[in-house]
Amino acid sequence: MTVTVKDLPGLDCGVCGFRTCESLAEHLPADPELLKRCIYYSDPQEPGTPNVAARPLARAACGVCAAASPSKGTTPWQDSLGREFDFYLDHFPEEPGPREIILPHNPILTRELNVQPGDILIGRPLGMSCGCPITHCGMVMQADHRTGVIVWCVTGPLRPRQEGFKDLGYYIAEGYEGLVRKRRCDLKIGMRYFFQPTMCMLQWRHSGLVNYLNRTPDALQIRVEGLWIG
Amino acid sequence: MGVRRIYLDNAATTPLDPRVVEAMHPHLDGVFGNPSSLHREGREARESLDRARGQVAALLNADPGEIVFTASGTESDNQALTGIIGALGAHGNHVITSSIEHPAVLETCRSLERRGVEVTYLSCDSEGLIDPDELAGVFRPTTRLVSVMTANNVVGTVQPINELARIAHDHGVPFHTDAVQAAGRIPINVRTQPIDLLSLAAHKIHGPKGVGALFVRTGIPISPIIHGGGQERGLRSATENLAGIAGFGRAAEIARAEMSGEAVRLVKLRDRIIETVAALVPNAYLIGHRHRRLPGHVCLGFAGMEGESIRLLLALDKAGIAVSTGSACSAYRGNQPSHVLQAMGFDPVRARGSLRVTMGRFNTDADVEALLRALPEKIMDLRPIATYPSTQIDKGV
């Protein structure tokens, strides 16, 4: 099919990269692929005209959640990969995000970077901790310069962007502390459970050993160590 | 002296054009009247309001009487969806939208669902395109509105709006489009395009924040969501934000006059980024459609380094270059994966790892060259989740 300037929309909009439709038409014989650059040509005026944008399979509309994440679990006790867990771990409401106990892969960094409460850090939890592929950002609550252990609250990327940061590179996630408001079974110290950190962006279940429990009227305060994803 | 900043996040917002500031100035210092007043001060203000309405209407080739000024693109979306359903009563009615809309539409739909409205969310393909065939298959006798965005804010893909709108009309259903990213960047002509409602915002076209507009085709039944003194044809009561509206009018006028020249220039810059990154960064892949995208919009992924997108953004920010890892409107949501990328079939790790570079009127070749100098080096500094042999890089989804 030969496309001439008459077939083009005549808008001279420049979105194809050429100043005018005429100019695009002049280049088409040498490079017919250029036609794909016209967003209006591929959006035909007449019904039934072949449309490069159209896809043949009409999929049943299934709601945004199912469309967004086909593997998402169907019950509240499944993670985004359909795996079961026993409780949701929420963060303390008075804190800026989930509280984690972490150790830089090189613990001396805590001293070398002079990590102090209130500092903003970034790093990724590598290897024999939770192994998450995502770089985390957070605010330091405590820093132990003797052991290198840092307690921080994980936040989004806005704080480091606005306030600057210290870069840990890799770290080990040693433990989580938070509140359990929703659980499907009784929890005991010394037992390992699968759980879902509420703020985990991937909504992947984690597992860990419960080594502290305190029942309060509102929720169960908990500490979990020995963390793995999955 | 600080490093010169290079702003490449024009999909989030754009810097004010000095010509827009000039148009706003009389309304910040002098012309203060209420356009509804009958005295000279009021008439002066009314004149400015009418002029701006004409300027915004011209951007869409609409009649000035079809333009309703609002406080934002988000309000325009809320007004369109809630207003159409409000005119009919919520219960039992059905709305069709897409799963990649801006939260201004998606959250309004959720709110409508709580009021008894049924909503169908269309899926999209891996390039972010809505399938007209899918739309054609989901109409019900109770369908009252179809709302699909003209161009996506996260990936830049431009939808086949004419075809989607025509399908809606074939079923006797009005069509709304959120054109906040598209208006002023690609041509829109509501006289030739079967669009019944269209949302736009001033601050995406080098105008001020806090002002938007909704095009409502004459004859479309719609209820107000803000009640009061009956301004804006009774659809948006409140004394008008005149300085903002005057700025919006001027911004629309400039965008209309300069759109085609700007498109050619921005497509050149956009394609230079896409092609250079592809050549210099072996694990880079383009997200969204190669050609059906906004002129100044680039969305990139880096295979194996998706989890490092925050670090990349921070490194570029430190080097004086402002880019985005997705929509600014979701930046406060604890860094969640993008609902748009997930709908495009990206797994949650990849859906978190895009780098959005969006250019506007004040970006130059030098800005792009600076980005292209910095980007490969910053990517080399990242810590990939795995070391991919270059031949086995999985760039698809």
Image: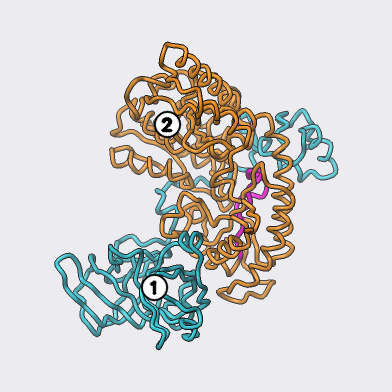
Q: Quadrant of residue B55?
A: top right
Q: Nearer the viewer, residue B300 or B209?
A: B209
The prevailing secondary structure element of the residues shown in magenta is: loop
Q: Quadrant of residue A12?
A: top right
Identity of the residue drawn at 61% across and 43% down:
A53
- Note the chain letter of the cyan one: A
In the figure, B99 relative to B54: above or below?
Answer: below
Crowding near the residue tagged with mark 1, few <14, some 14–19, many ≥20 C-alpha atoms within 10 Å: few
Give the residue type at disc 2: Ala
In the image, which disc is placed on residue B80? Answer: 2
Q: Nearer the viewer, residue A109 or A104?
A: A109
Q: Secondary structure at mark 1?
A: loop
Magenta residue span = B287-302
Identity of the residue drawn at 46% across and 16% down:
B41
Give the residue type at disc 1: Pro
In the image, which disc is placed on residue A173? Answer: none
User: Residue B61 location, x and y as percent?
Assistant: 60, 23
Query: Mark 1 highlights which residue?
Result: A117
Q: Secondary structure at mark 2?
A: helix
- Note the chain letter of the orange one: B
Q: Nearer the viewer, residue A195 or A218?
A: A218
Quadrant housing the N terminus of chain A: top right
Colouring chosen for the image of the structure:
by chain
